[in-house]
Amino acid sequence: MPFAEVSTEPGAVTEARHMLCLPDGVDLVRLMPFAEAVYRLHHAEGVIGDSLPGLQAPGVPVPQGLVAGWPSVPGETQALLAYASHSRVPAYLLRNPLPVGRYRRVIAATAGGVHALHLLSLAQALAREWSVPATVLWLQPPSVAGAPETARQRLEILLARSFALEPAIEVLRAGDIVRQLDSVAGPEDLLLIGAPHFGVAAYHYEGSLPEQLARIHQGPMAMCLSEPPERLAFREFLWEANICLVNEPIDRLTMITRLTDRLCASGILPADLRQDCIEAAMARERLSSTAVGCQTALPHARLPRFDGVAAALAIAPGGIDFGAERDPPRFIYLMLTSATSYNRYLGALARIARLMVIPARRQALLDATTPTAVMSVLEAEHPAAAKPR
């Protein structure tokens, strides 16, 4: 596979944010619906090429991502992963794609590694665009069978629920994960798996779980190589002015409106975006409740004219009805993000989840009587928090 300058059809590489698409032996007609979902997820334009650009090719910008056919030859797959790893861009490789309308289900299989959040968000995007259900398989070794749920498992499940996948979270315990995944995913299921970590993917694809699975699985399958979500301190997206304590019973719309008004009053959200924020958050609630367990709800609004990631937090000891079957959530984080702050948004979600799965931290938040005290609990993990930006 040559590392030459990119060839585009038609025209040249644009200066806008773009992701390179290399069919590489895969039917382009079948690859494009998958590629277009990835483009929208990353808010990028697609550029079709026939080879990888050189890392230092003059006049050819490094693409912000790669979508390609998944070669049957391990060495060619290794070249794609090495290029993405060295360029520090995400890569999505697809093999055995089906025509649009033939997929029955999207399955995201993860052991909670660095690619988990990206797999979950991609599964949600594909399921929505193709109108098919999505399933999350949490891969666990048989040694934990029957053991109590660990904090890490609670964290991963909470994050999965934040992507509206709660009804289809399954735990897969097997001694031979490769053969188990092969048997679980049918011929009309798209199986999503994470690539090896960046440091491993660049040189050691052969013998990895994805490579072993590719040898035997005949159905459609995609591999995702992504950077870990940006690690954020709480104070980078939430601070005292956007924290409120709620002691009276109110409904979901009133709660979201109150948190939106906090963001406006603190100067985080421009006043002319107030109604857009409320409507976007409520539209997301109509898809499914954002109550995610651990007494927590994560309503969110993505706004094209907002830059960055911010949050407002309400603590309601009596709970707020968010349409959940379990206990009404007591901790409501309204998440506000731009269309291009994808990695920071995932980092903020992960930061919240890591704290909210700990019962003692939730109790400490309930015991806090002022926004300053709440912020002290949130920052206890990271005393050297960064300034908001």
Image (cartoon, rainbow, N blue to C red):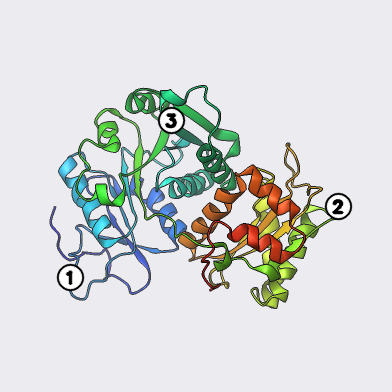
What's the amino acid at mark 1?
Ala
Could you classify mark 1 by the number of other residues whose Cα lies within 10 Å: few (under 14), some (14-19), or many (20 or more)? few
Side of 389 where 200 appears, left or right: left
Q: CA distance from mark 3 to mark 2?
A: 41 Å
The residue lying at 70 percent from left, 77 percent from top is: 271
Q: CA distance from mark 1 to mark 3?
A: 43 Å
Hey, which quadrant is residue 155 in on the image? top right
Side of 378 where 386 appears, left or right: left
What's the amino acid at mark 2?
Pro
Judge depth for marks 2 and 1 and give the one in front. 2
Tag 1 near tag 3, CB within 8 Å: no
Q: Which residue is mark 3?
A: 140
Secondary structure under tag 1 reads: loop
First-in-chain label (3 vs 2): 3
Percent coordinates x, y for residue 35 in the rendering:
38, 52
Mark on residue 57? 1
Could you classify mark 2 by the number of other residues whose Cα lies within 10 Å: few (under 14), some (14-19), or many (20 or more)? few
Side of 242 where 131 appears, left or right: left
**Viewer-side residue, 207 vs 362:** 362
Q: Which residue is mark 2?
A: 249
The residue lying at 74 percent from left, 47 percent from top is: 322
On screen, residue 129 above or below 193: below
What's the amino acid at mark 3?
Gln
On screen, residue 38 above or below 61: above
On screen, residue 193 above or below 342: above
Secondary structure under tag 3 reads: strand
